[in-house]
Image (cartoon, rainbow, N blue to C red):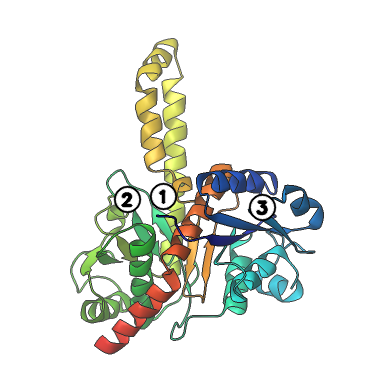
């Protein structure tokens, strides 16, 4: 059966290596999915040369730089590729938007242009934590440094919908990131959130600790944006350091280089299993449309996979699933 056509707006100017890696990622995404249409958004001299039947240029005369103040830039540059891409989702021309540009600007544009889903207090940024067992969705990873217990309940509903739609988990398990497994552990926020999650969230299994994030013990891990961002950046730095040290150790002597020829394939396989580029982007959950944000250093593979995540979210009607989850929470409250 043919999959439904999905149209994704892509920011041609997003990321440290744009537009070259974006264009390459778009080409790979189109080759992988015959039912995908791309609206490539950016300056005319960039996007027009890549026009085709399934890659349609949309001109945006401005670009928001990585160093600009996000909210101010979004308000001042209304014809920027990030704002135009968000507007394409808002007016129904696109089913989803992907950008590897400024995270703050993408969040501001999506929130201001697409708007929030009714009932959402604040949108949250999620990411998939790869694992050799099963991936987990960590939410929030930076959008909300200060939260209230009720917001963590909404984050759980949004993470549950995302794990179901994008990761294909029928009944996601959900946990609260804490400093211990017991209900009485942690801050007042954590204890109050535990009580609310227990009462309102299907699939809530209790607390998990930091060491559990990469073990794939649950499908969704809920926390505030400050803690989530620190945890994510720590994991990224640790992984990069370990693989760099491993490479240095295995190539330090001729004998070790011979050994590396034997263990190299296994090391590369492990690296691919925990590579964040496999998912390509972080969804901004809670806005009234699909918005996937890639990291600034995205390569073509990350762009291709980020577009793929946007397609799965659109085909799975992620926004509607989040609405349904919120309605269920309200009914159970």
Q: Residue 331 carries which label?
A: none
Tell me if 127 is positioned left or right of 56 in this view. Answer: left
Tell me if 264 is positioned left or right of 302 in this view. Answer: left
Return the x and y of residue 15 as percentages of the image width and height. 64, 52
Does 138 sit above or below residue 258? below
Q: Do the residues labelled 2 and 1 touch (CB within 8 Å)?
A: yes
Give the residue displayed 37% in from the left and 33% down from the top.
269
Tell me which numbered mark, 2 or 3, is placed earlier along the sequence: 3
Q: Is residue 258 visible?
A: yes
Tell me which numbered mark, 1 or 3, is placed earlier along the sequence: 3
Tell me if 216 is positioned left or right of 55 in this view. Answer: left
Q: Residues within 10 Å of mark 2 (few under 14, many from 20)?
A: some
Label 2: state its secondary structure. loop
The residue lying toward the viewer, choosing from 55 and 90, is: 55
Q: Can residue 69 be seen in this view?
A: no
Return the x and y of residue 188 as percentages of the image width and height. 30, 79
Q: Which mark is residue 214?
A: 2
The residue lying toward the viewer, choosing from 282 and 259, is: 282
The residue lying toward the viewer, choosing from 43 and 108, is: 43
Which quadrant of the view contains residue 267? top left
Q: Do the residues labelled 1 and 3 touch (CB within 8 Å)?
A: no
Quadrant location of the N terminus?
A: bottom left
């Amino acid at each position: 059966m043919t999959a439904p056509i999905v149209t994704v707006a892509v920011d041609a100017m997003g990321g440290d290596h744009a537009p070259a890696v974006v264009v390459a990622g778009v080409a790979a995404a189109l080759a992988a999915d015959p039912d995908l249409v791309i609206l490539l958004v950016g300056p005319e001299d960039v996007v027009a040369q890549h026009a085709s039947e399934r890659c349609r240029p949309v001109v945006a005369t401005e670009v928001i730089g990585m160093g600009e103040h996000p909210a101010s830039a979004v308000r001042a540059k209304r014809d920027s590729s990030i704002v135009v891409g968000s507007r394409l989702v808002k007016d129904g021309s696109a089913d989803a938007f992907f950008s590897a540009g400024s995270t703050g600007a993408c969040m501001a544009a999506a929130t201001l242009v697409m708007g929030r889903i009714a009932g959402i207090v604040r949108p949250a940024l999620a990411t998939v934590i790869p694992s050799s067992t099963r991936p987990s969705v960590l939410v929030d990873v930076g959008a909300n440094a200060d939260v209230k217990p009720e917001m963590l309940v909404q984050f759980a509903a949004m993470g549950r919908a995302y794990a179901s739609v994008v990761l294909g988990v029928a009944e996601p398990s959900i946990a609260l990131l804490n400093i211990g497994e017991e209900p009485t552990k942690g801050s007042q926020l954590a204890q109050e959130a535990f009580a609310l999650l227990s009462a309102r969230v299907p699939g809530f299994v209790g607390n998990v600790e930091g060491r559990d994030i990469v073990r794939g013990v649950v499908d969704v891990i809920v926390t505030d944006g400050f803690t989530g961002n620190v945890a994510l950046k720590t994991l990224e730095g640790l992984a990069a350091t370990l693989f760099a040290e491993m490479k240095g150790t295995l190539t330090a002597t001729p004998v070790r280089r011979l050994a590396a020829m034997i263990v190299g394939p296994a090391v590369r396989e492990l690296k691919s299993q925990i590579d964040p580029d496999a998912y390509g982007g972080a969804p901004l959950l809670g806005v009234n449309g699909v918005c996937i944000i890639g990291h600034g250093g995205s390569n073509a593979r990350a762009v291709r996979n980020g577009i793929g995540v946007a397609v799965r979210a659109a085909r799975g009607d992620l926004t509607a699933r989040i609405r349904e989850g919120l309605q269920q929470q309200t009914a159970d409250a």
